[in-house]
Image: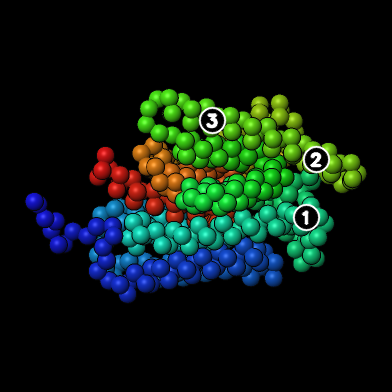
Amino acid sequence: MQLEHPSVKTIGQTDNPAARRVQYGSLIGLLAILGCYFLIEHRGNGVAWTWMERYTVVPAMLFLGATLSGRITRQAGRHLIFGVVFLAWFAATKALHRIEGVEASNIGTFFCAYGMCLPFACASGDGERGQGLKWILSLYLGLGVLLVLYGLMLLGGLVPGFLQDSVHWDGTRFSAMSHPNICATLLMISIGISLMCWGKWKKLWQRVLLILWIGAQFGILALTNARTTTVFTCVLLGGGLFCALRKSGWKRFTVACLAAVVLMGGLFVGSQRLSKAHKANMEDSRTVGEIHSTQYGWGSDIRNLNNRTEIWSSAAKGLRDNPRIFLEGTEYSGLIISQYNSFQVYHAHNSWFQVLYDMGVPGLLLALVLTAVAVYDALVVFWHNPDPVKSVSAILVLCILGCSALEPYLFGTYVSNQPIQFLFLLLTGYLDCWRAELKKRI
């Protein structure tokens, strides 16, 4: 029998318990800041917003210090090197922008995202134990409870005065956490975590309650009328059903596929009917002048992805006329794109287009590398791992990537998008750990 050399450190081993405690403490610090942001958001003179923007760098620095004080696995080293390279290029572009007299975006959230969230699972060894993952998922599940509560309060006209600026109807769309689309994506994440619980909990009454809870979240999500997120939430739920039903043999596989397709179709049709009924009810109770929406009918929106194709065309024209962006990026993406667009926009409405505007071609290449790794890890874990937490995490990562094709959720510094980016990077780190473990067994 061949014995492993004692210098080789596996994912689950530790040679520095004190460093491990600091790593977990750093995660708790980040989750505390996120929790404050979820509860306070931009209220209270922007206190929680400022904490997110400036102080998330503190737990990230503590995490990196603890990680570098001990031995680092090869896999964790790759994550750290990638994060450092991405951070270095981000800092270089922001320094160039400041030299040119432009007020550049703060580095804090980006430092936390790529210096801590991405390497956390491998560097802390939590990919095997999963303790930190439980804390992360619990926080986002609690956020789902908060958003459902907000939605019910809004439907009942019971929103207190201090919440009315951040929990309101955007036209006929339920809006919280800065925008209906962000609210919908966070609800999708909470639904995914509820699916993980459904796979883990075995008692009938627990599963019935979870199904009802998922239905409540999906109903509130439908009120946002965030169509892309609704589609990917249907994919998430259909994928969860597929994972629950699939067994060995092509017959069971076919049944699982058909059941998933039927569920996705039924959920999507139901969500659109609910959204349409809600919109009609709102229009009956309010004057037309009080309701404004940039969404149109499905026929128009399918052709141009709710004006996204026009925005992307304008973004391409902006790049053509400003070739310097390809090298160093710019802080004025919205202003440049709006010059070529028929209406004002604030960003490129695509995560990869936006990172090209923010950090040039080098930043885009790094984002594409991370995207390819995330997709590969997610597909491998989804296909080969029967564990519901791991398989649903894989589907959730793919769904977040799908939503990011129409919104700049990833690779950026927008504070309101950071809860989505943080979770995506944390899950991507875990998926890479799980994929590496699967590779040893396959």
| Residue closest to the eye, 306 or 156 | 156
- Residue tagged by mark 3? 259
Q: Which amino acid does label 2 sit on?
A: Lys
> What is the distance, in whole Å, between disc 1 and disc 3 at their CAs?
34 Å
Q: Mark 1 points at which residue?
A: 154
**Relative to 334, is 67 on the left or the right?**
left
Q: Earlier in the sequence, mark 3 or mark 2?
A: 3
Residue visible at 66% across and 28% down in the picture: 302
Q: Which of marks 1 and 3 is in front?
A: 3
Label 2 secondary element: helix
Badge 3 amino acid:
Ala
The tag on residue 119 is none
Question: Which residue of the protein is positioned furthest toward the left in this rendering?
Answer: 1
Residue 116 appearing in the image = no
Residue at the spot x=41%, y=55% of the render? 118
Q: Which of marks 2 and 1 is nearer the N terminus?
A: 1
Disc 1 crowd, CA 10 A, few/some/many (<14, 14-19, 20+):
some
Amino acid found under the numbered disc labelled 1 = Leu
Q: What element carries label 3?
A: helix
Horizontal side of residue 95 vs 311, given as left or right: left
Residue tagged by mark 2? 279
Which of 49 and 383 lies nearest the eye of the viewer?
383
